Image: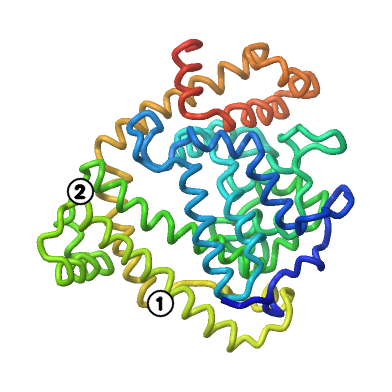
């Protein structure tokens, strides 16, 4: 593993700084400070009771947003270390990437986006943009500023770890106006939304893909929505089980499962490292700005593995994400969000005392909707269910 950072890595001493200047930390790098502030934030702690796929109360062994974020951070540190990148920055972005998620995962996000759609210019809801709003405004613990006052590089990574948000290289899903929370932060501090992010941010993004591709298979098996026999005909998973069966005939079920899925995990990590090393070498990048200006990602899966993983994800979509039992629960929790949001719009006095300052500052219904969305999106699964039972 490289002992010094590559020239195209984000250097600890070359950060673009923070929106509110602070004295240098005495025994940490700036990116270590970012990581530590994220870990100690209220939003990060709430992730322990937020859905990954299965609603939090459905079982103790399923992943939550918190355990998912920790797994993403572990992969990101490994990849960044091998590639000579800044491991602290990659870890900070990985830990922060899901801070903006609503209760009930993407189900809650879809419901809240629909509820917010009429309230232009705050229309819709985007969890990546909401993560930025949390770390720049909604975390209110420090005397000198709102938010966590993270470095520009960490904010950039949160904003565009999945690629440019504006310009010719932006994904088509970003068509239309910027999410309000993202536009608000970008107006305060230009995050160069039309360029690709640092290699560290790209590492965080691919680590997210690796982590959920691995653990969703594990959680799906544990849930009984499919079994090992169903995975034998799929690329990547089938060969992994076959390799385990050759090495360990008659291995008990749980150990066989673990051994196979850790091989799936290894295939993805090794593929990304090989592709990244080749692309970084070919690009000849000598600075992080060279990485941002390449017009393409340097951290990605190979084309053959990407196609194989599409088959695995298609299987998961049908057999897990859209399984009848999961869809039934999705409908139930959607009703909770659909009930709480309009209730708080008509009765904002029901929000806790610490939110009444924001309520009082809202000058119209549109601004009130933004405050209510902030509050509802910050709920954990269990709190949203309890409030639904109490108030609806």
Residue at position x 68%, y 31% in the image: 370
On screen, residue 75 versus residue 24, left or right, reads left
On screen, residue 369 versus residue 12, left or right, reads left
Q: Secondary structure at mark 2?
A: loop
Asked which quadrant contains residue 257, the reply is bottom left
Q: Which residue is mark 2?
A: 226
150 or 260: nearer the viewer: 260
Circle 2 packing at 10 Å, graded few (<14), some (14-19), many (20+), is some
Residue at position x 58%, y 27% in the image: 376
Q: Which residue is mark 1?
A: 303
Circle 1 packing at 10 Å, graded few (<14), some (14-19), many (20+), is few
Residue 281 coordinates in the image, percent (x, y): 59, 87
Position of the N terminus by quadrant = bottom right
Q: Secondary structure at mark 1?
A: helix
On screen, residue 254 versus residue 127, left or right, reads left
Disc nearer the start of the sequence (2/1): 2
Task: Give the vertical position of 155 relative to 60 (above or below).
Answer: below
Residue at position x 17%, y 65% in the image: 233
Residue 183 coordinates in the image, percent (x, y): 73, 48
């Amino acid at each position: 593993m490289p002992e010094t950072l590559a020239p195209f890595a984000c250097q600890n001493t070359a950060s673009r700084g923070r929106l509110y200047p602070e004295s240098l930390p005495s025994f940490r790098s700036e990116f270590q400070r970012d990581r530590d502030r994220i870990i100690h934030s209220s939003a990060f702690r709430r992730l322990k009771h937020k859905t990954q796929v299965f609603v939090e109360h459905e079982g103790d062994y399923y992943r939550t947003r918190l355990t998912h974020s920790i797994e993403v951070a572990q992969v990101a540190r490994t990849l960044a270390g091998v590639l000579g990148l800044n491991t602290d920055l990659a870890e900070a972005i990985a830990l922060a990437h899901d801070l903006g998620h609503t209760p009930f995962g993407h189900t809650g996000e879809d419901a809240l986006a629909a509820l917010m759609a009429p309230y232009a210019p705050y229309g819709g809801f985007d969890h990546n943009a909401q993560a930025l709003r949390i770390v720049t405004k909604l975390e209110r613990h420090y005397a000198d500023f709102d938010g966590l006052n993270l470095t520009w590089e960490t904010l950039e990574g949160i904003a565009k770890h999945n690629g440019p948000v504006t310009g010719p290289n932006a994904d088509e899903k970003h068509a239309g106006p910027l999410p309000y929370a993202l536009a608000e932060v970008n107006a305060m501090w230009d995050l160069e939304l039309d360029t690709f992010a640092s290699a560290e941010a790209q590492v965080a993004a691919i680590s997210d893909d690796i982590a959920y591709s691995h653990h969703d298979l594990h959680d799906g098996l544990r849930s009984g929505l499919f079994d090992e026999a169903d995975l034998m005909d799929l690329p990547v998973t089938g060969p992994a089980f076959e390799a385990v069966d050759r090495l360990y005939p008659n291995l008990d079920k749980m150990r066989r499962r673990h051994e196979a899925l850790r091989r799936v995990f290894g295939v993805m990590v090794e593929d990304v490292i090989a592709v990244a090393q080749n692309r970084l070498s070919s690009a000849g990048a000598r600075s992080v700005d060279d990485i941002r200006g390449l017009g393409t990602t340097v951290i990605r899966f190979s084309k053959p593995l990407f196609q194989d993983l599409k088959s695995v994800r298609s299987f998961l979509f049908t057999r897990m994400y859209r399984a009848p039992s999961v869809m039934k629960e999705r409908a139930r929790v959607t009703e909770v969000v659909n009930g709480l949001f309009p209730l708080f719009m008509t009765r904002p006095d029901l929000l806790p005392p610490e939110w009444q300052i924001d309520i009082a500052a809202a000058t119209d219904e549109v601004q009130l909707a933004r405050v209510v969305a902030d509050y509802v999106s910050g709920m954990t699964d269990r709190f949203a269910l309890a409030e639904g039972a109490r108030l609806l």
